[in-house]
Image: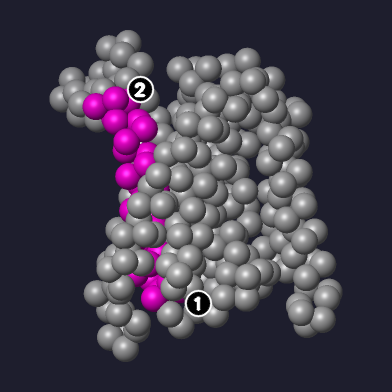
Amino acid sequence: MDLSIIQALVMGLTQGLTEFIPVSSSGHLILVPWLFGWPVKDTFLGSLEFSVILHMGTLLALLVYFWRDWLKIIPAGLATIRDRSFKGDPDRKMAWLLVVATIPAVAVGPLLTGPIEDAVRDPGLVALMLCVGGAILWLADRWGTKTREMDTITFRGSLGIGLAQVFALVPGISRSGISISAGLFGGLTREAAARFSFLMATPVVAGAGLWEARKLLSHDPAAPNPETKLVVIGFITAAVSGLLAIRFMLAFLRRQPVTLFVVYRVLLAAAVFVVLLSPHGS
């Protein structure tokens, strides 16, 4: 089998799973090719185009899973503008909670995404951030009261979750991980924190994909040309694995703590440091 097909499959799976499981998708997309020794940097698989495709795959997963929610939230939000009132409707309130939570990413993301990701692409730094993000997630799960449901989120709380999400620009922190942590610190149950994180991810992932797609207009024409088979494989695997990851996370967090993900992050970081200290890493 063509190696590029395997690479596209692995990177699509990596994006889809780690976008929603709190272990950092950006960190894994740096570490996975590095650990396998795949020189994808100057290929289509390492291009901006392929990154956009993977983001669109995870966006499709969000829309498929939460389509019923959005069919209620979007009309409710528009009705709020018309009536200038929530009228006690939780969907109207949720629409604007999500708007507030998205504001920090919209305001800061376009300014810092490039500089931060360029500065923190070293595998050792990614491994360190995996540990930092894991510690935050563990503390949030340990200290949070886990007594509040999603309908108790305040506008102040949603802004706090949105501000926390900005730190996910650093590869290794994890967008889902830091936003779930913020929800847990705010007293939400694990499932409520994850559900709000995933709903909030829909406009954020869409915005990130559109922002990267915008940059394609000025992209280097000498960049590798898209390969149809890799586009299809990356998109489908990111979408399907993303949908499975959302289902898994919401079901898992109804019954279990986040310890599994914290342990995984630490073990992966340890593996990275072992490789870095080995002759291969040097």
Neighbourhood count class around disc 1 (C-alpha, 10 Å): few under 14, some 14–19, many 20 upward: some
- Residue 95 in view here: no
Q: Where are the magenta residues, as a range?
A: 44-71
Neighbourhood count class around disc 2 (C-alpha, 10 Å): few under 14, some 14–19, many 20 upward: many
Q: Main secondary structure of the magenta part?
A: helix
Instruction: Give the answer, above or below, for where 175 lies relative to 4.
Output: above
Q: CA distance from mark 1 to mark 2?
A: 44 Å
Q: Residue at x 76, y 43 (%)?
A: 263
The answer to which quarter of the image holds residue 118 is: bottom right
Tag 1 residue = 40
Q: Residue at x 66, y 69 (%)?
A: 35
Q: Which numbered dot is residue 93?
A: 2
Q: Please, what is the three-letter code of the amino acid marked with disc 1?
A: Val
The answer to which quarter of the image holds residue 213 is: bottom left
Instruction: Give the answer, above or below, for where 280 lies relative to 158.
Output: below
Q: Residue at x 57, y 17 (%)?
A: 148
Q: Does residue 70 show up magenta in the picture?
A: yes
Residue 239, image x and y in percent? Answer: 38, 47
Give the mark toward the camera: 1 or 2. 1
Residue 95, image x and y in percent? Answer: 33, 29
- Residue 148 in view here: yes
Query: Residue farthest to the top?
Result: 88
Q: Residue at x 77, y 51 (%)?
A: 266
Query: Which image quarter is the N terminus in?
Result: bottom left
Q: Which numbered dot is residue 65?
A: none
